[in-house]
Amino acid sequence: MAFGRGKVILLGEHGVVYGHPALAAGLGVGVHARAVASDVDVIEARPWGVFARVDDDDEPLAKGYAAILEGYPSTRPRLRVEVDVELPGGAGLGCSAALGVAVTGAIDEALGIERSATERGEYSLRWERVFHGNPSGVDNAMAAAGGIALFRKGHPLEPVRARRPLPLVIAHSGESSSTKEVVAMVARQHEKEPARVGEVFEGIASLVRNARLAVEAGDLAALGQLMDMNHALLSALMLSTEQLEALCRAAREAGALGAKLTGAGAGGCMIALAASRAQAEAIRARLATLSPLTLVAEAGGLDEDVMLADAEGRREEGKPE
């Protein structure tokens, strides 16, 4: 059984598409997948009632599966991939990337192919391009590796050691968001006003660098302030909504150290940083009165060891980090 995890962007959305850094964290929930021999290549997503062959022109999951299969030998056996999804789609939690990573991992297991977490994340971009056009790659990288990491497009993940776990509260706005459409909207802004949008991206990049230092120092109060500032800059790009604003405001009133939208924005989810797990539960209870889906998760746990081991393995093999 292969696993692709969900993720949240702590800071750095959208600027990451243009080469700026983002600070991301993997979640303990995501997508499980397994591949078994079959007469035809087919994908089955149980929670959504999808059962589609790769030649199904109308089913997006079939198109994603076909893109993944293109990189495997044509002599391979036909496979049925079964997936169980624990994440909502269009919520900024990396559901699509988790699917791509899990499907790739399941096929690799079935065919006896070994890849590092970094390699699996990179390969599964084939899937993401079907759904998101020009993905930054951060979702795939975190879906495969987990932990907390600094991501820059075209560069391997830089694992970040958290001095203490980050208690996070995640709440869905109830509004669907298309990453592809939102990224395109920001691209139009960038094309029309390159100086203004460029300054916003530079400001976000500065916040990301300081946030990394705060995570490594265990300074949650500073991290929360940086998250608030990042949200303000994203709002300047018209990426927030009334519901996201209401959730962020309610989280801060309930004691959150900081709160912001996460992912593409224009809907989807927000995250709030708490000082403790107990406080996170209290914040979640408050947000549950405004949101159809809430959960508490900690970032900066055991996944870091996996990511750091993978980075060390790449150094030993002489691969660029």
Image (tube, grey):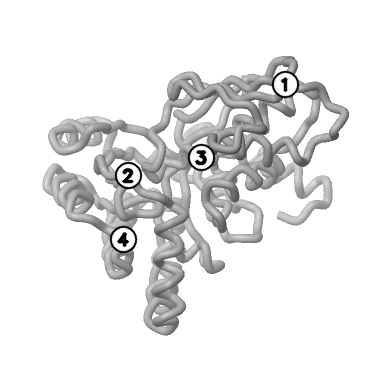
Give the residue number, with chain letter if any, for mark 2.
176
Asked whether the beta carbons under mark 3 and mark 2 sit within 8 Å of each other, the answer is no
Q: CA distance from mark 3 to mark 1?
A: 23 Å
Q: Measured from the top left, where is residue 59 in percent x and y?
A: 54, 35
| Labels 3 and 1: the sequence-earlier one | 1
- In terms of depth relative to the viewer, which is nearer, 238 or 217? 238
Query: Mark 2: which secondary structure?
Result: loop
User: Amino acid type of disc 2?
Assistant: Ser
| Labels 4 and 3: the sequence-earlier one | 3
Query: Looking at the picture, does residue 304 appear above or below residue 12?
Result: above
- Which residue is rendered at x = 61% and y = 42% of the image? 127
User: Amino acid type of disc 1?
Assistant: Val
Query: Looking at the picture, does residue 135 appear above or below residue 175?
Result: below
Give the residue number, with chain letter if any, for mark 1.
40
| Labels 3 and 2: the sequence-earlier one | 3
Nearer mark to the viewer, of 2 and 4:
2
Nearer mark to the viewer, of 4 and 1:
1
- In terms of depth relative to the viewer, which is nearer, 135 or 223? 135
Q: Measured from the top left, where is residue 19 in percent x and y?
A: 56, 67
Asked whether the beta carbons under mark 2 and mark 4 sit within 8 Å of each other, the answer is no
Nearer mark to the viewer, of 3 and 1:
1
Q: CA distance from mark 2 to mark 4?
A: 13 Å
Q: Measured from the top left, where is residue 38 in percent x and y?
A: 72, 15
- Which residue is rendered at x = 19% and y = 46% of the image? 247
User: Amino acid type of disc 3?
Assistant: Ser
Which of the labelled discs sits on residue 239, or is there none?
Answer: 4
Give the residue number, with chain letter if any, for mark 3.
96
- Which residue is rendered at x = 38% and y = 74% of the image? 200
